[in-house]
Amino acid sequence: SVNEDGAATVDFFVYNDELLPITVEFEYEIPFNGEADGPESENIASGGNKSFTLAITGIDVWAHQADSKEDFKITVTLVSRASIPQPLPESKEASGELQIPRVYSLEVDVSDPVGPMNAGSEMSLQVTVRNNGNVNDRVGSIEVSDNCPLLTTDNGLDILTTRDIQSGQKTEASITISASQSHPQRNCDVEVTISSNGAANTGGSDISHDEVRITVEPPPANEEQPEEPDDPNQTVEIVSSNLPFASPILTISMLILAVFSVKNRF
């Protein structure tokens, strides 16, 4: 079976049941675009056998579906007997099976805040979880932590534990962060840590975390209130009148009549 690094090791041997020593050459066929590192040729004594190791590397396990199986092949060709080249080389083949492992790999990313937040307010951050593994998975556990005691978070990320994420796909959720009204001006680091549910079920562990820094500033200053009288006992009097409003036209007419009346006295 291939490991998560895309490597495998195959041990094999060649037995010479002839009366003469032989020289053999090896060829390898590796599936999943893997690379072979093994012997190219060897001399084997009469009646003897030799063991060899074939190292297989370079398989991209993330590029192949989990549990996929394909055969590899080792071809051994007898090219000479007692150092005499064979006009018709004889070949034999041996094969085995390589299996792509299940790779659980979740990656969490927390969006950066658009700016600072004020004490007594809330801020929403988007959290993205991507499945970089080669098998369907989901979030197993979530932990949100911060270094500011007057900062709180909601449980908006709990929904991530209910969603299956296909290989190469992602899912998103939002978390709301609240700062107490009495929160001092401070930079707060908020960290989100998730684990793979699939890895936990197979006895493994896959943890991913990301953090962002949030700046908490004092609440906005209150709007200016009307000025209070210096003397709290001072009484402000409001004078009102019930007299009817006299329009400018009426006032001018009254003045004209008054002038006319004076002139009649002469």
Image (cartoon, rainbow, N blue to C red):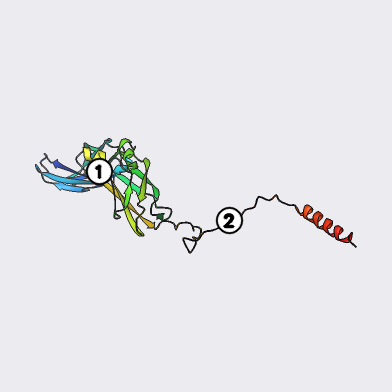
**Foreground: disc 2 or disc 1:** 2
Horizontal and vertical percent position of residue 263: 88, 61
The image quadrant of residue 106 is top left
Q: Disc 2 to disc 1, how far (Cα)?
A: 111 Å
Residue 214 in sight from this viewpoint: yes
Q: Residue furthest right?
A: 266
The image quadrant of residue 97 is top left
The image quadrant of residue 206 is top left
Q: Is residue 216 above or below residue 100?
A: below
Instruction: State the mark number for residue 161.
Output: none
**Residue 55 falls left or right of residue 166:** left
Mark 1: few/some/many CA within 10 Å (<14, 14-19, 20+): some
Horizontal and vertical percent position of residue 47: 9, 42
Q: Is residue 147 above or below residue 167?
A: below
Depth check: give the residue in front, 76 or 240.
240
Q: Residue at x 30, y 42 (%)?
A: 133
Asked if labels 1 and 2 touch by Cβ distance under 8 angstroms, the answer is no
Mark 2: few/some/many CA within 10 Å (<14, 14-19, 20+): few
Q: Residue at x 31, y 53 (%)?
A: 150
User: Does dot 1 land on a helix, a strand or a loop?
Assistant: strand
Depth check: give the residue in front, 201 or 68.
201
Horizontal and vertical percent position of residue 225: 49, 57
N-terminal of the two: label 2 or label 1? Answer: 1
Residue type, label 1: Glu
Horizontal and vertical percent position of residue 101: 25, 39
Q: How many numbered marks, from 0 up?
A: 2
- Quarter of the image with the N terminus is top left
Residue at which label 2 appears: 238
User: Does dot 2 land on a helix, a strand or a loop?
Assistant: loop
**Residue 21 falls left or right of residue 74:** left
Instruction: State the mark number for residue 27.
Output: 1
Q: Residue furthest bottom?
A: 230
